[in-house]
Amino acid sequence: MEDKKRAFYQEYEVFSKRTYKAAFQHQFSLLAPNEEIAMVMAQENFMRREPVVDIWVVKRSDIRKMDQEERQALQRLDNKDYRNSKGYGYLKKKWRQYEQEMLDEKEILSWGGDQSK
């Protein structure tokens, strides 16, 4: 009996948008025999609760997710820390080191030897 029920009902994901400029947000999942009933159920659920300007109902089996190999491809192999503001933290240390190595006037004059003789 449970298998027949699963075959009759399909899982749908419901997304809604509160304003025309807002992004769609996932709200909930529901079981329905077809897309039309799923849409009616989603509308009934929202019309009583909050204002919305649009609702999407998507069959869960139509949603494609990334497989493990694709997820691994998202990981960056090279160092892109310079793109993040936290990646510049080393500059203060480098600048301090540079300032300490700067030549002062006395040191430069000492290279020429004693010119007063």
Image (cartoon, helix red, strand yellow):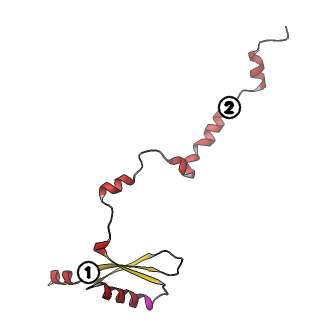
The answer to whether any part of residue 48 appears in the image is: no
**Image location of residue 15, percent across then percent down:** 41, 78
Left or right, 19 with respect to 61, comes to: right
Image spot of residue 35 (x, y percent): 31, 84
| Dot 2 or dot 1, earlier in sequence | 1
Q: Secondary structure at mark 1?
A: strand
- Label 2 packing within 10 angstroms: few (<14), some (14-19), many (20+): few
The structure residue drawn at horizontal position 58% and vertical position 42%, both measured from the top left corner, is 90
Specify start and end residues of the magenta stretch as a single range. 44-52
Q: Is 21 included in the stretch rendered in magenta?
A: no
Badge number at residue 54 = none
Disc 1 residue type? Gln
Rendered residue at 35%/53% (across/down): 72
Q: Which residue is mark 1?
A: 10
Q: Quadrant of the N terminus?
A: bottom left
The answer to whether one can see residue 38 in this image is yes
Q: Residue furthest top?
A: 117
Residue 51 on the magenta span: yes
Asked if 49 appears above or below 116 in the picture, the reply is below
Horizontal placement of 39 versus 98: left or right? Answer: left
Residue situated furthest right in the rendering? 116
Provide residue 41's location: percent of width, then percent of height.
Answer: 35, 88
Mark 2 secondary-structure assignment: helix
Residue occupying the far left of the picture? 1
